[in-house]
Amino acid sequence: MAKIQKKGNSGAAKNYITRTRAVKKLQISLPDFRRLCIFKGIYPREPRKKKKVSKGSTAATTFYYTKDIQYLLHEPLLAKFREHKAVAKKIAKALGRGEAGDAARLEKNLVPKIKLDHIIKERYPTFTDALRDLDDALSMLFLFANLPSSEHVPAKTIALCQKLCHEFEHYVITSHSLRRSFLSIKGIYYQATIQGQDVMWLVPYRFVQRTGGDIDFRIMGTFVEFYTTLVGFVNYRLYTSVGLVYPPKFNADLDAQGAELSAFQIEGKGVATNGDVSHGDVSVTANPEAQALADRIAAAPVTEEEQPEELQPVPAGEDENTETIDKFEAVAPDADVLPQPQASSAEVAALFAPYTFYLARETPRAPLEFLLKAFGCKRVGWDSTLGDGAFTSNESDPSITHQIVDRTAIPSEDASETVDGAAPKVQWPRSTMPGRTYVQPQWVWDCINQGKLLRPDLYAPGAELPPHLSPWVKAKKGEYDPNLPLQAQELEGEAEAFEDAEEVASEAEAEESDDEEDEEDEDNAMESDASVEAGEGMQVDGSEDEEDDDDEEPQKPTDDWDGIDSDAESDVSEGEAARLQHQRELEAEATGKPLEPEVQTTKSKNAAVRKKAEKKRKEEQDERDRQKMMLSNKKRKLLKRIEYGSNKRDVEAENLRRKKRKLERVKAAAGAV
Amino acid sequence: MAPNPRKRKAVTRDVPAASDSEEELADGLLDGILSHSEGESDADQEEDAESDTSSVIEGLSDEDEDEGDGTFSDTDPEDGEQGIREQMRKLNTRDASAQLNGVDHALDLDSRPQTDGELDEQEDENLKPNYTVTTDANGNPRYLYKEIDPVYDSDDSDAPETTNTIGDIPLTYYDEYPHIGYDINGKKIMRPAKGEALDALLDQIDIPKGWTGLTDPATGKPLNLSEEELDVLKRLTRNEVVEDGYDPYPEMVHYFSGKKEIMPLSAAPEPKRRFVPSKHEAKRVMKIVKAIREGRIQPYKPPSEEEEEEEERVYYDVWADEKPRPENSMHLAAPKLPPPGYDASYHPPPEYLPDKNEEVAWLAADEEDREKDYLPKSYEALRKVPGYERFVKERFERSLDLYLAPRVRRNKLNIDPESLLPKLPNPEDLKPFPTMCAAIFRGQEGRVRSVSFDPHGIFVASGGDDGYVRIWELLTGRQVWNVKLSDEDAVDAVKWRPTKDASILAAAAGESVYLIVPYSILSPDVEQASRDILDAGWGYAASKPSTTTNGVTKEPPGKWARPGSKFESKGVLVQATVRSMVKIINWHRRGDYFATVSPRGQSSAVAIHTLSKHLTQLPFRRLKGIAQTAQFHPSKAIFFVATRNTIRSYDLAKQELVKILQPGAKWISSIDVHPGGDNIIVGTYDKRLLWHDLDLSTKPYKTLRFHQEAIRAVRFHQGGLPLFADASDDGSLQIFHGKVVGDLMENATIVPLKVLKGHKVKSRLGVMDVDWHPREPWCVSAGADGTCRLWS
């Protein structure tokens, strides 16, 4: 006979361990345990059978894998932590004795230095694993690179983060692996594809970050400690994979002058560089200023040649690109869509390559510089107030083809007055340079996301910008897509229903809409004394009202019918309508007059369409309800859960469509006025 | 410190006390004069005198005791004492003598001339009687005498004060004796102690050495202190050095001097190491020198911090020999954050911006309840975009998630909802079934409780709260016949006899069941056939009266009678009365029997009536539970009775219980048997419609719950269409397709078809009854709103 097994000695009860027990087992303090978990990437697990694991108690507990904790017992870091604790005691003792010098010496010499190299290898056995986990690391480092130093965040850490971030950016620029970017209200999202892995990170706008009370910087600091090591090794691997020397030379003086990216000197590894380096001019020579000068000289004739090129609508490279993958577009709408690779790095490298950009001083220089360079632009200049390291800081440089500005132009009546020097001093808000394109920063982002140069006139300074859309959203079936026209998306009869609803609502909102229209007219800002204009406005409104009245007379009964959504009733109403029609015909026959065609107002047409659609929908709904009636309870609940998501999506989409329709209506009304 | 203030205090306390007593003295004197009485002050004085002398007396008594003079009786010493007291008063205390002697009053008078007037008054008063007459508590006169004032010429004052009781004998006689004479009893009066004697006495009593009068708290014995100890105490109190001969400032003695001694303390010779350089040290120094020369030891230079940093960060290719993670590892990578949507844009399409209500709702919501942690906002230019306030917080929360949140791999629900839904036959294929209201029969007052189609499908009978039975023509919706059966009771049930050869309507009002032949709407031959059927039973019951075993005529369960000429003229031909209110009537398919159910009548709840014999039988002596409804099997001799919770089927031929069905309902309202006989539908007041397959199980095959309110009636179509309907208090009828196949292997298919709405809900009652047309897919329903509706 088999031995009777005791409960709680095997299986789930043994495989999981609570946090308290884990801490006890490791004999470390909770903060140390936390640090260890962050470093080692150990996270709690959710047991499938919680009751068995917690032995019947229902209290909320965090469970770890017992094996995970078992492995931690042999972790070299644990010994380091213990050493650290011993030293901390010594330091505390020295300080207690008032021997500050001793304490400093102890701290300097005895405090163990924690190295996380082995953990990196352990947590990310392959480089792809590391790349996959780079999102959080980069976001965190970019945040810390933009934080002010404080007692929680030492300046050294910030400097290190900045350095690593710039190094990574240099790699992205060199390898042309940046794919998309997005200006969000939170910050700027970037997405790069590195060795087949999509890495997305978020960079905050350069403002002082609010660091509220409930943020524990010790935890963040632990993460940063780990992430700096990780990104350091990743950078090393990335640099060496494209044949660059890591770490790149860092010019502290230039960095102090705000050169940022230009403070780094990227060097190729010896002569034997592979093909990756060939298309990127990575080896920036010793003196960037001299280099910039040389570049400018080299670029000057090119730009002149480019002018005619710009006029051509189709880039010349179209027929050359035999190697690139052609884009397959489905002809029939119901066919399946196969995923195709995105733009290759060659295309990315060519996007801005022929142009020279100049950033006005109100534009964010760091992201623009990074983006432009990553998409092939080699000559980016900016105002000298934005920092050092520009290709040119002279705005009137003739080689500049595009100027990115974020200010409206000031009418230049005094432009002639300034022309007294030898060279015409061109300054953006006052005057423009002929042959130069002035665009707002969003143009750069939209160009990148669409993979082609867009019409710059839409993005001209002062123009109302087109909406900036996230490049990651792929509209699914039933979701609202702002790129498509409204008519293509809305359900049958929805627009009509909306219009009718608006008509009803317009009565109530009449006064408000009057005000709105008045505002749009822009000619009676002050309502009190602009009686004449107000009168004009009234005339227009009055005529509209009359129309409305006419329309609403027949509208009324239909509305009433809507109230009762009984099949029988609606059938009766239809029968009634038919009967009325017949009666009219009879009358016409009797009087001998030709039958007047029924006045088909838009409203009645709307009503008909809407009613038809509604009926159809109702029928479908009835059918569905009938089917649901026959489901078993279990399946019905499952269906309810499935439908919850889709219903939510539908409601959201409908809400968006409604808003869009409203906006279109307002716009149409404004256009009419 | 402490004793002095205490002393001073004692003094200060004494002083006012003394002054008080002086004042009191003066007052006492005055009082005494005014009241001619010995005031308190006098007594005080006496007491004072006594206290003054008491110590002496005590001393004397002590002396007596010491002498061991135990022969004195108790009174003697008192007398002696008193005498001595008096003597002493004479001798010592001036006040006492002045006051005690009556003679002294003259002196007082002389010394105080201001009281002369008062004295005269006293003399006048002496002439008056010295009493006043009052009445006492009993009403008798009571003489209240004034106090006798022992004035100068009172009798008492004549007797000389006896100060010496020894008589008029010179004391010198007794010089040699210890006593000074004899008292009236012949006892010796001892000589009072003189000063010398007291001194001698005190000299005789020796105080032990060191007596302090204190008790040792440790031992409880009197504390004696020796001379030395007292001396120590005295010195201590004076802050002097306690010990005798202690020199607080002695002369300094130099133990160690700067003087060098000639002789060493130890005779050992000086060791060599004291003056020879160490070879070992030289060796070690040479080692270092050598290392320095060879460059092994660098002169120390504090490293700068930057260098340290540089040293620390050494990067190399960690993934030089990368091996993929083993397949079986339990690692779950952290999920990536989702990419931003359109509404996160700094300049989103305008439709993504929240309107006013949404914005208010977002702001009002708790931070954790918000679906999105940001509010979409549009900025017209990039330069106007502010910093995002929650950036650090969001990153921090993400970090927390990374190390605190449990990770679970969850399978995403990827089921096409359409696949879950069953494939139902198209409603078009299930046609015909009633879809709309074809006619409304109005005219009833109050609720319509019951409806019934006649077997030809031409007429509809209805009965309601107004006590009328009405018959309507189906096609026209016209009322063709009616009769008022009762003034008080409602017509609870109407039911046509199911055979086509005759047209008989059974209606129940109160405790009676009326059998009606509405001849005015019938053809004469049908009328005659109907009358024949009803009349056949007359006399049968009379010829065979039911008797019990002991010969006593028991009251029959039903009385069959003619209802009276008024009713008979309308066509109501037979009245059968049972013991309690009849609620349900159900005919046997052949029309010879009908069953009535009266839920209130316990043992007579279910009755089976035989039409041909005008006989009423009670099949159940005792019924478990309250009967709700009863029905005949359509083909077999089986009878179904539904109580509140169960349905029992009885074999009428064998007279035994066949089956108990347990629908699991709380309260069954109605049942109906499928024409095939193997299926039963059950409607319940707990909103359920249950389909029982008798061959399958005692539990329901399907439970349908589509009504919001109780179900009142259920009915199968009896004419071959696979339809059934239920009527509910929510004012709706539901029509189902319920197909029963002859094949035993196949279950019944039930398909919901139609919800028929139209009846209004009145006082929480909707549709009360439903009945199907015998052939067509039409049904008629009775509503609580006083209408019947035909649905086709």
Image (spheres, rainbow, N blue to C red):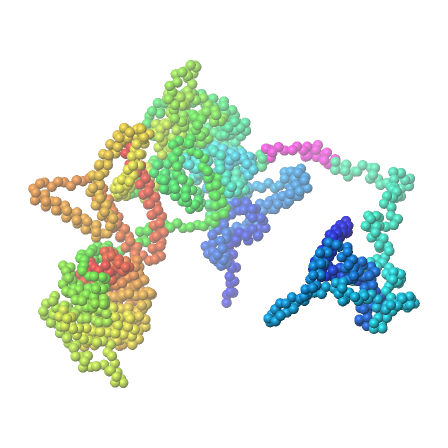
- Viewer-proximal residue, B413 or A602? A602
The stretch in magenta equals B286-308
Residue B399 vertical placement versus B741 (above, below): above
Instruction: Give left or right: position of A19 versus B187.
Output: left
Q: Residue at x 22, y 61 (%)?
A: B446
* B290 part of magenta stretch: yes
In the rendered image, the quadrant that contains the C terminus of chain B is bottom left
Q: Position of residue A278 (x, y in %)?
A: 45, 30
Where residue B628 appears, x then y in whole percent?
A: 28, 68
Furthest-bottom residue in view?
A: B550
Residue placed at 46% from the left, 41% from the top? B394
Residue nearest the viewer, comparing A231 with A649: A649
Residue B367 in which image quadrant: top left
Image position, residue B612 (x, y; %): 17, 76
Q: Is residue B29 magenta?
A: no
Please identify the quarter of the rendering in which residue B255 is found: top right
